[in-house]
Image (spheres, rainbow, N blue to C red):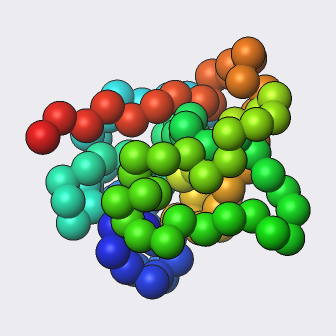
Amino acid sequence: RAGTETAYSYGDVADGDYMWCNFNNSGQIHKVGEKLPNAWGLYDMHGNVLEWCLDQWDNSDNYQMADTEATAISDPLVTTGSTRVLRGGAWLYGAAGCRSAVRTSYGQHGGTDDIGFRVVFP
């Protein structure tokens, strides 16, 4: 969530200057960096493609939450199961589906044109 408590890393209102979603995408994936970055300089954190995460999917009420930012980054919270967590929404989602808190899942041996991953260099 880029250190925020808002619906999106930049605020609470969907803004096409920061995201590719179903109201502005022309029905396709776009090159990274065509929209504004978040506060850390990361692009396309909302929409464009779903982020394939390290965590396995757990939809129970007892889903563990990381106790610190460090453990959220380095350790998967759930390590068993056949599906993985996806975050960040995609080009075919509505703006609400691209909010920071939205999680969904997909089988770990599959793929579609709306799933990707983030590469970050220090």
* Quadrant where the image shows the C terminus: top left
User: Looking at this view, is 96 or 62 the one in front?
Assistant: 62
- Tell me what residue is drawn at x 52 percent, y 28 percent: 116
- Quadrant position of residue 102: bottom right
- Tell me what residue is drawn at x 72 percent, y 24 percent: 108
Q: Position of residue 12 (x, y in %)?
A: 48, 82
- Quadrant position of residue 111: top right
- Tell me what residue is drawn at x 56 percent, y 45 percent: 76
Is residue 33 found left or right of 24 in the rendered image?
left
The answer to whether residue 85 is visible is no
- Quadrant position of residue 55: top right
Is residue 80 found left or right of 49 in the rendered image?
right
The answer to whether residue 34 is visible is yes
Please count the marks in the image. Answer: 0
- Tell me what residue is drawn at x 53 percent, y 65 percent: 66
Is residue 83 found left or right of 43 in the rendered image?
right
Q: Residue furthest right?
A: 60
Q: Position of residue 5 (x, y in %)?
A: 45, 83
User: Looking at this view, is 69 or 21 the one in front?
Assistant: 69
* Quadrant where the image shows the N terminus: bottom left
Q: Position of residue 24 (x, y in %)?
A: 51, 49
Is residue 69 found left or right of 117 in the rendered image?
left
User: Looking at this view, is 107 or 22 the one in front?
Assistant: 107
Asked if residue 10 is positioned above or below residue 40 in the image, the reply reads below
Q: Position of residue 29 (x, y in %)?
A: 50, 29
Asked if residue 44 is positioned above or below residue 106 in the image, the reply reads below
User: Looking at this view, is 100 or 44 the one in front?
Assistant: 100
Asked if residue 122 is positioned above or below residue 96 in the image, the reply reads above
